[in-house]
Amino acid sequence: MQHPIYVTKTRLPEPETFSRLCKDIFQRAWITNNGQCVQELERTLAEYLGVSHVLVCNNGTMALMLAIQCAGLAGKKVAVTPYTYVATLSALLWLHCTPVFVDIEPDTLCLSPELLRGRFEEEPDIAGVLPVHIYGLACDVENLDALCREYGAVLIYDAAQAFGSRYHGKSLLEYGDYSICSFHATKIFHTVEGGCVVYHSADAHKALPLARAFGHINDTHYSLGINGKMSELHAAMGLSLLPGTDAELARRREVRAMYDAALEGLPLQRPALREGLDWNSAYYPVLLPDEECRVLAEQTLKEHGIHPRRYFYPTLNTLPYLKEEWRVSCPVAEDAARRVLCLPMYGGLNSKDTQRVASYMNSALYGSAKLFSSNF
């Protein structure tokens, strides 16, 4: 019987490594409120990423909300991609921002700077821009930065999927006024639940830790805050996993190469990689020729124990709870969402796994599946 292959598989550290850190936490009896493991994780992440400041949080959505709040964007207009996970939009709506959807580039699937310029010209009161390094791929950071400087907008990157991606030698989290990352268990690096904000300014260095901890220090209250703190146990998971992250990234590159070879010749479109990008291979997205092919491919794979995902569907500009005036057509994103399928991707996949996936993709598209032996 063939073993199931899921779209991802959570990385776990050696039990002894995690247990040793947990034992230390128990001895200190300090399990939250900016404890030793949280502080150490922030230091080691800043060193690993090559950035000046990292603030860890209890999840990626909270990290994004803290960045939006501390950037002064709450209640204002923010341009955002429609092609991403719903948490990107949720953070804006919880802070009463008005989303201004800007369609994506057809090759990279990232927010289009050209279309963003048009929205700035139509709506000069746009105060911030929230692009997403979708699938860990790089946005057009040079043009987006130039546009935001020209129009005086704050640039916050949702880099939830971009841990380990580097662009021209720098972490993708280094770009923008703020970048946020998710440390959810499905990500390459995780803390079970968690996230971080990468920032650069002295004002942010003062405001973000305060906002994360209810806005007060002891009995003195300085600002509006929320509980965005990460626990010591979650930080311990991150400290246990970080040393093996480079090996996971290298293995994912090997898996991506296996897929590229196994799927060669099939009518699949892949997002373009910008020159200078060292991609983390967080996902393996393909665009099928049309929605009918996508449905057939997904059904065929699932019938044989392979579980891809439709990352990202539906597009955010079509969600039913949006105000009518926020709904705009984003044809490129909507077309991609109808045709996209993310194939299983994690370091533990082997060549037989990728060949099995490729064979059933071939079966769906051409009706010529190979027969698999029981050693699968």
Image (cartoon, rainbow, N blue to C red):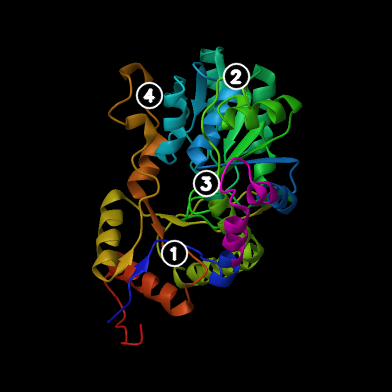
The magenta stretch spans which residues? 20-40
Tell me the tag on residue 328. 4
In terms of secondary structure, where does tag 1 sit?
loop
If you read the primary sequence from the N terminus, does the residue marked by circle 2 or circle 1 appear first?
1
Q: How far is disc 3 from disc 4 in space, using C-alphas?
A: 32 Å
**Mark 2 and 3 residues: CB-CB less than 8 Å, in contact?**
no
Position in image of residue 99 (x %, y %): 45, 23
Kindly report which numbered mark, 2 or 3, lies closer to the viewer in this rendering: 2
Q: Which one is nearer the viewer's eye here, 67 or 359?
A: 67
Tell me the tag on residue 74. none
**Amino acid type shown at disc 1:** Lys
Kindly report which numbered mark, 3 or 1, lies closer to the viewer in this rendering: 3
Q: Which one is nearer the viewer's eye here, 41 or 318?
A: 41
Position in image of residue 317 (x %, y %): 37, 30
Residue that numbered label 3 is attached to: 194
Q: Which one is nearer the viewer's eye here, 244 or 307?
A: 244
If you read the primary sequence from the N terminus, does the residue marked by circle 3 or circle 4 appear first?
3
**Mark 2 and 4 residues: CB-CB less than 8 Å, in contact?**
no
Tell me the tag on residue 223. 2
Kindly report which numbered mark, 3 or 4, lies closer to the viewer in this rendering: 3
In terms of secondary structure, where does tag 3 sit?
loop
Mark 2: few/some/many CA within 10 Å (<14, 14-19, 20+): few
The answer to whether any part of residue 53 appears in the image is yes
**Amino acid type shown at disc 4:** Val
Residue that numbered label 1 is attached to: 9
Kindly report which numbered mark, 2 or 4, lies closer to the viewer in this rendering: 2
